[in-house]
Amino acid sequence: MKNYVVETIRKAQMVQLLAAGKRLDERALDQPRELKVETGVIPKANGSARVTLGNTEVIAGVKVATGIPFPDTPDKGILMVNGEILPMSSPYAEAGPPSPEAIELARVVDRGVRESKMIALEDLSLIPGKTVISVFCDFNVMNVDGNLFDAVSYAVVAALKTAKMKKLKVKDDKVEATEEVVPVPVKKTPVSVTFARIGERMVVDPSAEEEASMDMRITITTEDGGNVCATQKGEASTITPAQVLEAADIAIRVGRDVRARILEATK
């Protein structure tokens, strides 16, 4: 989503504004765009959510099934996050196999969910080494206007927090489904906050226009206690230790507000 001609030409103006603490859309440097979270948008899914962050829009859905555990984690269930940036979402998105950007997007969101211990995977083991519960969360980017990392993360987290499944029991080494419906064992609410550095200043929740001019991107995910559980840097430029600490402080503060919005939408 880079190299927009117009945005590149405007980078000098953007750097000048940021040096004065201003942004093109008049937000403060640490101010995210308006966030809306809607749940239950896919009736046939075990859980689902639609998130809009500014004009960026993402839909996520959860499917729960039984499966075979990975050999190195025989006593834990499976969690997988995958997704697609739909061709209609941006003039720069193309049909076909997932782009490197889409693969990185899914991996960063997956890492934030996984490293926060959001899902108690040990509670999804039915017959160790043989049968576990698999939780698949797929997302579709409906409209691209910057900061897909956070928009996708919020949609995936909201969908997982509302996901329900039939309670399973083991009898005579066989798995049987009951009629009781229970929630997926969610323990945490991870929240990612993404920054773009343009020139010497960093901004929260970069728009598409800002992303087109950024020198460096960093995504920091925190869990409920405010602890940082995952970090991912993007783009070729470097970041200083002081900038990392500054970003972490902001991620904790902004993440607290975003988490409250997600909890309100999924209660």
Image (spheres, rainbow, N blue to C red):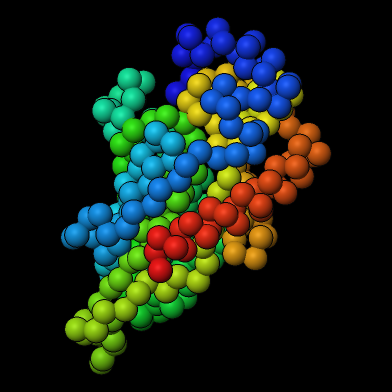
**Depth order, front residue of 229/77:** 229
User: Disc count in the image?
Assistant: 0
The quadrant the N terminus occupies is: top left
Work out whether residue 29 can be spotted: yes
Quadrant where the image shows the C terminus: bottom left
Left or right: residue 202 versus residue 213 is right
Depth check: 133 or 74 in front?
A: 133
Q: Residue, x 42% and y 74% (percent of image)?
A: 185
- Please tell me which residue is depicted at 34% across the width and 25% down the height of the picture: 90
Q: Quadrant of residue 256?
A: bottom right
Q: Position of residue 96 (x, y in %)?
A: 27, 29
Quadrant for residue 235, please give it.
Answer: top right
Residue at 68 percent across and 23 percent down: it is 18
Q: Nearer the viewer, residue 24 or 71?
A: 24
Q: Is residue 135 left or right of residue 4?
A: left
Residue 29 horizontal/vertical position (percent): 65, 33
Residue 237 in view (yes/no):
no
On screen, 24 above or below 108?
A: above
Q: Residue furthest right?
A: 242
Above or below, 169 relative to 241: below
On the image, the x and y values in percent for residue 40 come to 27, 59
> Does 54 sit left or right of 192 as displayed?
left
| Residue 233, placed above or below residue 224 | above
